[in-house]
Amino acid sequence: MQAVAKLVSSETFIRDVVTYQNTWMGSTKRSLLVVTGKVLAGVVIDSTMKVQVNPETKTISLDIPHARILDVVVTHMQTYDERSGLWNPFTPSDRDTIFQHVRAQLEHTADDMGVVGHADSSALALFQTLLAVPGYSVNVRFQLPAPVAQPAE
């Protein structure tokens, strides 16, 4: 067990077509799938976050890390075509490889859709609302630099 604090600030459902192909000794196996998944993006709340309250200027400042993809959940996977090669049949390890390939493709599609940018905007708005105190101004900033795409945990 470990303690975690994650703010999911964007949830996106994605449907995609995935093809898997593996060739061994000139024999190719293929699979065509339609997958549906849920991509969760948000902020990991950890010790890098900094909060400063200045009673003189009546400001609350918060530095937060940029959002990232927190998880990719495959909710449905339908195989439409599967063909084994003559010397290259499907094995249980192929199923695991296909599942990881599906997760990676859904994550890539989410990146193309700008899910992390949406999660940044949502987290910013949420923290500004949560920290709003009458008479104080709230300044939420992202820590620099913005991360490159992170793999899902």
Image (spheres, rainbow, N blue to C red):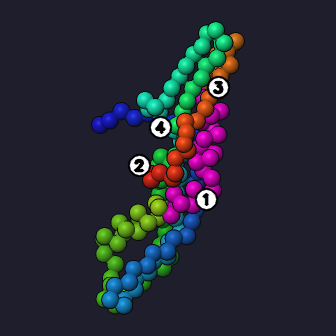
In the image, which is nearer the foreground, mark 3 or mark 4? 3
Mark on residue 139? 3
Look at 70% across and 12% down and name the residue there: 135
Of the pair 49 and 16, the residue shown nearer to us = 49
* Identity of the residue furthest to the front in this view: 145
Whether residue 32 can be seen here: yes
In the image, which is nearer the foreground, mark 2 or mark 3? 3
Q: Would residue 105 be found to the left or right of residue 4 on screen?
A: right
Magenta span of residues: 105-129
Residue 113 position by quadrant: bottom right
What residue did someone put label 2 on?
Answer: 153
Mark before the other along the chain sequence, 4 or 2? 4
Q: Looking at the picture, which amino acid does disc 1 mark?
A: Asp
Mark on residue 44? 4
Q: CA distance from mark 1 to mark 3?
A: 29 Å
Q: Is residue 122 above or below residue 91?
A: above
